[in-house]
């Protein structure tokens, strides 16, 4: 069973690792995380908005497009993401589709170096896979006409197979389609090997969903090592790779991988808006394109709560960035 949305009850929360020899008692860091997570719904909205403001551009498409324009001024391309997932009905999925079509038009109208990134369950994958595919086709066709790319995001492991199937169904007729793979999962090297012939546009992430130890790495060093191994595999596969990370030590390791792959290695770094911005200039000066991921939407509070509860590392990264202005 994969990581689940925590608004379905505490039994759906990913299980944290326990320390060895502790008789089943949780370690102090895990206990602290659970305590903080349980208090998140009680945090006043203005405080939660302040926590979220560094990495969420606002509630409207105009907010997001404005942020992309600001980033362009600074020399950074972008990715736009409407917050939302696991919609309750087809009407909500249709509304998300319309919003993404409007986002594509807004990007093209402003001649921004940006593209849209979409969660399959936001387009109704959990409700009707064929209808979800049809919505992706609508967006992909319009983006193709506008000269824009589209990224299919990866969610928790319950949807991995269906998401890869979506990608394969779309990429034969829509070459601007990209996919995401998660280094955390044991299955990912096999998924990379199973990618069909031709060019692939892949975003490599560590994986925000804390999946069970039976199917995923849980140790931070093991996750980083798996990330580097996946990076080598993707570049050897000839993929164009977007390395999504804020880990400066990992970026140093990736630089060696990219150098070893030679001139044919196509890559960029991707970062979440507001997280460790001091590194962006450093990485760009080292020769990497740095693309900034810009989330927006009225679902910002639910999104922030879910992400901070699912992964304490995100909570720590946002607090650190806010407190120390990295």
Image (cartoon, rainbow, N blue to C red):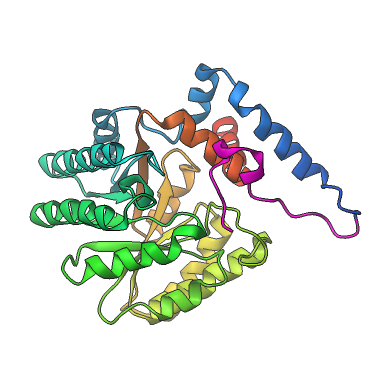
Q: Is residue 301 above or below residue 281?
A: above
Residue at 64% across, 49% down: 14
321 over 172 or under it: above or below = above
Q: Which residues are magenta?
A: 1-21
Q: Is residue 82 above or below residue 118?
A: above
Q: Report whether residue 157 is seen.
A: yes
281 part of magenta stretch: no
Q: Is residue 321 visible?
A: no
Q: Provide residue 25's location: percent of width, then percent of height.
A: 86, 48
Q: Position of residue 106 (x, y in %)?
A: 16, 38
Q: Residue at x 37, y 40 (%)?
A: 87
Left/right of residue 166 with respect to residue 149 in the rendered view? right
Figure quadrant of the N terminus: bottom right
Picture quadrant where residue 89 is located: top left
Report the front residue among 113 and 283: 113
Write the residue at 30% across / 56% down. 151
């Amino acid at each position: 069973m994969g990581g689940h949305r925590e608004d379905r009850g505490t039994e759906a929360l990913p299980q944290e690792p326990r320390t060895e020899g502790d008789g089943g008692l949780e370690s102090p860091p895990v206990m602290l995380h659970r305590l903080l997570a349980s208090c998140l719904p009680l945090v006043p909205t203005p405080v939660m908005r302040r926590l979220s403001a560094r990495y969420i551009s606002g509630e409207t498409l105009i907010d997001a497009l404005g942020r992309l324009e600001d980033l362009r001024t600074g020399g950074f391309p972008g990715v736009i993401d409407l917050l939302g997932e696991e919609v309750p009905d087809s009407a909500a999925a249709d509304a998300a589709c319309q919003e993404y079509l409007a986002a594509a038009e807004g990007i093209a109208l402003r001649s921004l170096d940006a593209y849209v990134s979409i969660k399959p369950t936001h387009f109704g994958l959990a409700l009707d896979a064929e209808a979800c595919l049809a919505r992706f086709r609508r967006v992909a066709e319009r983006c193709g006409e506008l000269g824009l790319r589209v990224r299919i995001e990866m969610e928790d492991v319950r949807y991995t197979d269906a998401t890869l199937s979506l990608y394969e169904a779309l990429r034969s007729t829509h070459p601007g389609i990209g996919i995401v793979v998660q280094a955390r999962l044991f299955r990912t090297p096999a998924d990379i090997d199973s990618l069909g012939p031709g060019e692939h546009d892949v975003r490599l992430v560590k994986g925000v969903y804390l999946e069970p130890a039976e199917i995923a790495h849980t140790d931070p060093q093991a996750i980083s090592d798996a990330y580097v191994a996946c990076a080598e595999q993707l570049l050897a596969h000839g993929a164009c790779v977007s390395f999504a990370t804020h880990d400066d030590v990992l970026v140093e390791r990736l630089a060696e991988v990219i150098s070893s792959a030679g001139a044919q290695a196509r890559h960029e770094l991707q970062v979440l808006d507001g997280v460790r911005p001091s590194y962006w200039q450093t990485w760009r000066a080292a020769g990497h394109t740095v693309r900034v991921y810009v989330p927006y939407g009225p679902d910002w509070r639910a999104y922030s709560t879910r992400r901070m509860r699912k992964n304490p590392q995100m909570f720590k990264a946002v607090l650190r960035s806010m407190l120390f202005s990295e």
